[in-house]
Amino acid sequence: MKNNLVFVFVFVVFFSCKDTDVVVVADDSEEKEIENIIVGANTDSEGCLTTAGYTWSKLKKDCVRLFNSAIRLYPKTNPETQDALLISYIILSDDGMEAELFIPNHDQSLVLIRTNEGLPYIFNDYELTAFEGFTLRQNGEVIYLGDGEIGPKFTGKDKNDD
């Protein structure tokens, strides 16, 4: 008797599940396949998973997560901010002669180039100097500053005040 109950239970459970990949249209009784879409899997034109924080790096020729692998530059007007929408990022080439700059509100990254070690990286009206950290200027005016470290700036504020 127990075996029959188990069999009936499994039978009911198995056939009560509905296949969600097929939709039956009432008007013409045609079946249409639903495209399987992975929610939260948005990719950019290079195939980087943007919803996971990846963006394409021209210098690395790969998808990178800026907040883990790039040097942060903080706005001169708000150097203590941790708001990712205000922070710029730089990635240096392996030989140190190019710097890829990711600036808020810019669709594309900018590649700044220096001709010799010790000189600033330059692209159009942007100039990036590397001395005791990084300073980014636009038209000669300082707009971003950074300590030269990869990842978030240590402020000491994450200690417990016990």
Image (spheres, helix red, strand yellow):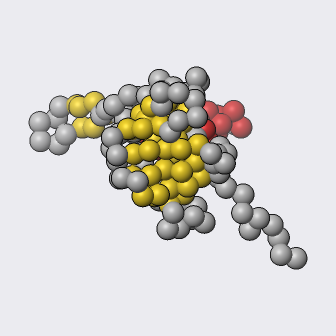
Q: Residue at x 39, y 45 (%)?
A: 126
Q: Is residue 61 left or right of residue 146?
A: left
Q: Position of residue 93 (x, y in %)?
A: 54, 27
Of residues 31 and 107, the one nearer the viewer is 107
Q: Looking at the image, which residue sits at the far left?
A: 28
Q: Position of residue 45 (x, y in %)?
A: 33, 31
Of residues 11 and 22, the one nearer the viewer is 22
Q: Residue at x 53, y 67 (%)?
A: 78
Question: For the C terminus, which image quadrant?
Answer: bottom right
Q: Position of residue 127 (x, y in %)?
A: 44, 44
Q: How many marks?
A: 0
Question: Does the image show residue 47?
Answer: yes
Q: Is residue 23 left or right of residue 72?
A: left
Q: In which image quadrant can residue 9 be found?
A: top right
Q: Residue at x 42, y 34 (%)?
A: 111
Q: Position of residue 15 (x, y in %)?
A: 47, 35
Question: For the N terminus, which image quadrant?
Answer: top right
Question: Does the image show residue 85?
Answer: no
Q: Looking at the image, which residue sits at the far bottom?
A: 162
Task: Identify whether 59 is placed above or below 26.
Answer: above
Q: Is residue 98 left or right of residue 162?
A: left
Q: Residue at x 47, y 27 (%)?
A: 115
Q: Looking at the image, which residue sits at the far right?
A: 162
